[in-house]
Amino acid sequence: MDIKDLKIPDCKKYSGYKPCIPYRNCLTEGCENISENKIGTKILIISLDALGNVLDNTPILPAIKRKYPVSTIYWITLPNAEKILFNNKYIDKLFLWTDEHRMILRQTEFDILMNADKSVYACAFANEINAKTKLGFLLNSSGKIIPASQSAMYSYLMGVDDNLKFRENTKTGVEIIHDVFELEYKRDNYVFELTEQEKIFLNEYKKKINYDSNKLYAGFNTGCSLLFPNKKMTIEQHIYIIKELLKNPDIKIVILGGREDTERNEEIYNAFSTEEKKNIINTPTTEGLRKGACYMDIADLVVTGDSFGMHLAIALKKYVIAWFGLSCHQEIELYDRGIKLYPENLDCSPCWKRECPYNLECIKMIDLDKIMQIVNSKK
């Protein structure tokens, strides 16, 4: 074949390296699945920072497909967020924040770039991408973060105006990111699906713990990221609530958390008697994000602070009892499956401070009785 006769198939699966079907030459025989695999509109999503934010951005995917039904969606994220986007039916090509993957994306022409992150490095990378339309956030010539279009102005102003973010805003983060990317907001759920093997693992684990479908399994996501340690209740508060709930014979407790919560969860679990522990499942914390999702899926409802665990519970469509202190409860979408608890008469909340100058009043004000009342009402 002469190079001038080379016609690259407009197909998502064609790589130029090897055939997607053994012994089929798409260059000479044509592509048998071209209609369902047509590249169409090429869209790159940049969403790197914070696991919860990456998961919180997944509702844009169904909206993108409604607006651009024939399209190829590329998504770049940090390596630790890869498992969040694994098994996602909307994402055609998942890239990680590595030199090799960034090099590939710089050499690809896109129709639309959607940068969700207001971070200097994400915006700098967005500047480098070859795209006809850029939405979200970029850097100006002085290295300052700026909105890429008018549709990002509201989100941009929320970052620089505390009064707007803390007092005036009533939109959820999911709604705001739809506005930023000029997408129709229809309250689509988070996109997160367990694989068939994970479902098998979950069923086997349920057998191991003698799962009883007649009981209510109340999950307690006890921790949060080390970046904002004051997003969690105290160990003593958890022990108090769990001890009171165990008085209800129809309730079982599921202790949940990540690797950083291992010692904390052990301390909570070991505060109970041997008899009480019969109704407490202290799930493993060191087996990774996907296994953690399987363990959380045992729970019927999840009590949590504003953390990745909260977003995961939302993604798994659990009833969520979420409490807020330093962060903004308005920005969280529970999809009518839960309740938010927050201090209504505390001037310093929200604040988004990593260290509290006021003796953690927002944590002390968490309505523990309200949490117990809601949990008990579910059974």
Image (cartoon, rainbow, N blue to C red):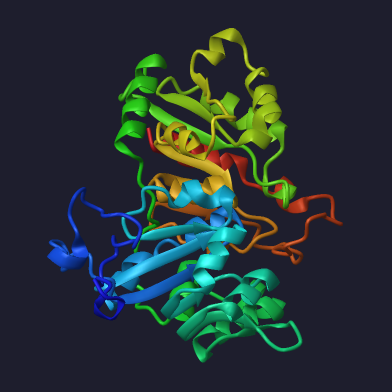
Name the image quarter holding residue 156: bottom right
For the C terminus, which image quadrant? top left
Q: Is residue 128 above or below residue 370?
A: below
> With 102 as the anchor, is 131 left or right in this view?
left
Lateral position of residue 208 relative to residue 344, left or right: left
Residue located farthest toward the top when viewing the structure as drawn: 274
Q: Residue furthest front?
A: 2
52 or 78: nearer the viewer? 78
Instruction: List x then y, in percent, for residue 195.
Output: 33, 39
Q: Is residue 187 above or below residue 231?
A: below
How far from the left and from the top, in percent, is residue 309?
Answer: 54, 45
Please state which of residues 368 and 270 is positioned toward the viewer in this rendering: 270
Q: Position of residue 154 (x, y in %)?
A: 56, 84
Q: In the image, residue 314 lies at what x, y percent? A: 44, 50
Q: In the drawing, does residue 330 fall left or right of residue 164?
A: left
Q: Quadrant of the N terminus?
A: bottom left
Q: For the image shown, how many numbered marks are present on the structure?
A: 0
Q: Is residue 259 visible?
A: yes
Residue shown at 48%/56% (left/top)? Answer: 55
Residue 97 appears in the figure: no
Identified at 66% across, 17% down, the residue is 270
Question: Who's the residue at 44% across and 52% down the image?
Answer: 85
| Vertical position of residue 175 compared to residue 291: above or below | below
Q: Nearer the viewer, residue 73 or 331?
A: 73
- Quadrant of the image occupied by residue 276: top right
Q: Is residue 238 left or right of residue 177?
A: right
